[in-house]
Image: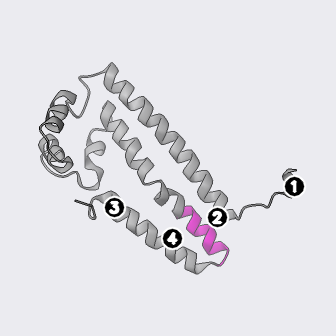
């Protein structure tokens, strides 16, 4: 029965495998990070009680980030500076997980180039650029 199924193109397999495994690892990170936050509450980047108080005061997401860290966290500097805290480690998992398209498209672009598909290489490069702009905080909504 497996012989009857068509084989997916190489670029689909490469992209799919990378997205699958990075997402799986990021889910584990986002599961383990809050456990560290609960086990070691003194080792957190954010005081949860202060954060919840700001939320219930009706502050926006940008106002909360500024109240917690002094300015907007450009280029993911919050998790980078607080990587060895529970919530910093969780933020790392979220940051990598939300940019999984970038990490998967980079090797997929090489597969497109090897298969002589320049239009897909160009389109993938544009998508990578858009993900970088969004992930860096240069382009944001609100």
Q: Find out whether residue 60 is within the magenta segment.
A: no
Residue for badge 4? 124
Dividing the image into 4 quarters, which one contains the C terminus?
Answer: bottom left
Is 13 in front, or is 141?
141
Q: Distance between the residues labelled 3 and 1?
A: 42 Å
> Residue at horizontal 51%, vertical 45%?
23
Of callouts 3 and 2, which one flags the residue occurring earlier in the amino acid sequence?
2
Number of marks present in the image shown: 4
Mark 1 surroundings: few (<14), some (14-19) or many (≥20) residues within 10 A: few
Residue 45 is situated, as x and y percent measured from the top left of the image, at 23, 34
Residue for badge 1? 3
Residue for badge 3? 134
Q: Distance between the residues labelled 1 and 2?
A: 20 Å
Does dot 2 land on a helix, a strand or a loop?
helix
Q: Residue 11 carries which label?
A: 2
Q: Distance between the residues labelled 2 and 4?
A: 12 Å
Of callouts 2 and 4, which one flags the residue occurring earlier in the amino acid sequence?
2
Give, as a single range, the part of the protein colored magenta: 106-116
Residue 42 is situated, as x and y percent measured from the top left of the image, at 23, 23
Q: Distance between the residues labelled 1 and 4?
A: 31 Å
Using the rendered view, name the quadrant where residue 48 is placed: top left
Q: Magenta-highlighted stretch: main secondary structure?
A: helix
Left or right for 80, reference 103: left
Left or right for 42, reference 31: left
Looking at the picture, does residue 8 appear above or below residue 86? below
């Amino acid at each position: 029965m497996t012989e009857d199924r068509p084989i997916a193109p190489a670029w689909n397999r490469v992209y799919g495998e990378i997205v699958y495994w990075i997402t799986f690892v990021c889910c584990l990170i986002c599961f383990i990070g809050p456990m560290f936050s609960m086990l070691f509450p003194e080792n957190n980047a954010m005081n949860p009680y202060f954060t919840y108080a700001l939320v219930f005061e009706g502050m926006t997401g940008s106002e909360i980030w500024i109240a917690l860290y002094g300015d907007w966290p450009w280029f993911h500097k919050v998790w980078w500076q607080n990587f060895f805290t529970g919530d910093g480690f969780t933020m790392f998992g979220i940051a990598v997980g939300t940019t999984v398209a970038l990490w998967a498209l980079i090797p997929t672009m090489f597969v497109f180039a090897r298969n002589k598909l320049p239009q897909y290489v160009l389109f993938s490069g544009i998508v990578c650029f858009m993900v970088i702009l969004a992930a860096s905080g240069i382009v944001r909504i609100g």
